């Protein structure tokens, strides 16, 4: 009887905490929100993107998106953005893909192994590489 009570208690705890753990999943990743701000997993603003220009938290230009290509502030090509939002490095290797059939306003970004690495507002799907720029801590001009 004691074993049954312990098992039921454990199941009750899992049932109550599982939804909370699942809801927190999005907070474990960087996020590009509907305002174009890139936030880290703790909600700290790392920078933003506006009209294809990527700024760090200090307001310094660190990169730009032009003609489906990502470049640093000096104009060095860092990668290419596919029509579906997939980001490729300069060698053509996939850096991340975007959830193709997202429901709602937020889309997940997946690394080549299928692990969720970030989320992005649907309006910024083709500019999600801003997260890549700000997480690699690119120097400002």
Image: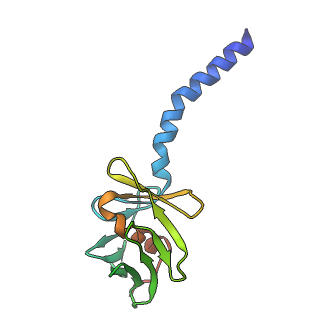
Residue ID at (27%, 61%): 35
Q: Is 23 drawn above or below residue 74 in the view shown? A: above
Across the whole image, how many numbered discs are drawn on residues?
Answer: 0
Residue ID at (35%, 76%): 54
Residue ID at (53%, 32%): 17
The quarter of the rendered structure image containing the C terminus is bottom left
Residue 52 is drawn in which quadrant? bottom left
Q: Is 78 drawn above or below residue 83 in the view shown? A: below
x and y, in percent, of residue 127 in the image: 35, 69
Apparent side of residue 124 relative to residue 137 in the rendered image (left or right): left
Apparent side of residue 96 relative to residue 113 in the rendered image (left or right): left
Residue 91 in sight in this render: yes
The quarter of the rendered structure image containing the N terminus is top right
Apparent side of residue 55 relative to residue 19 in the rendered image (left or right): left
x and y, in percent, of residue 105 in the image: 32, 51
x and y, in percent, of residue 5 in the image: 67, 14
x and y, in percent, of residue 134 in the image: 44, 72
Given residues 38 and 118, the one toward you in this image is 118
Residue ID at (44%, 86%): 77
Residue 47 in sight in this render: no
Residue 55 is drawn in which quadrant? bottom left
Apparent side of residue 95 relative to residue 85 in the rendered image (left or right): right
Q: Is 107 drawn above or below residue 10 in the view shown? A: below
For the rendered model, the colour scheme is rainbow
């Amino acid at each position: 009887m004691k074993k049954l009570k312990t098992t039921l208690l454990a199941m009750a705890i899992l049932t109550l905490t599982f939804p909370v753990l699942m809801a927190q999943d999005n907070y474990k990743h960087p996020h590009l929100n509907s305002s174009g701000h890139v936030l880290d997993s703790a909600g700290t603003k790392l920078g933003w993107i506006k009209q294809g220009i990527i700024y760090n938290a200090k307001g310094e230009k660190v990169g730009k998106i032009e003609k489906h290509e990502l470049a640093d502030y000096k104009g060095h090509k860092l990668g290419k953005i596919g029509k579906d939002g997939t980001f490729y490095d300069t060698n053509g290797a996939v850096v991340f893909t975007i959830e193709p059939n997202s429901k709602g306003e937020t889309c997940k970004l997946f690394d080549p192994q299928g692990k969720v690495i970030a989320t992005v507002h649907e309006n910024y799907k083709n500019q999600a590489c801003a997260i890549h720029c700000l997480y690699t801590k690119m120097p400002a001009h």
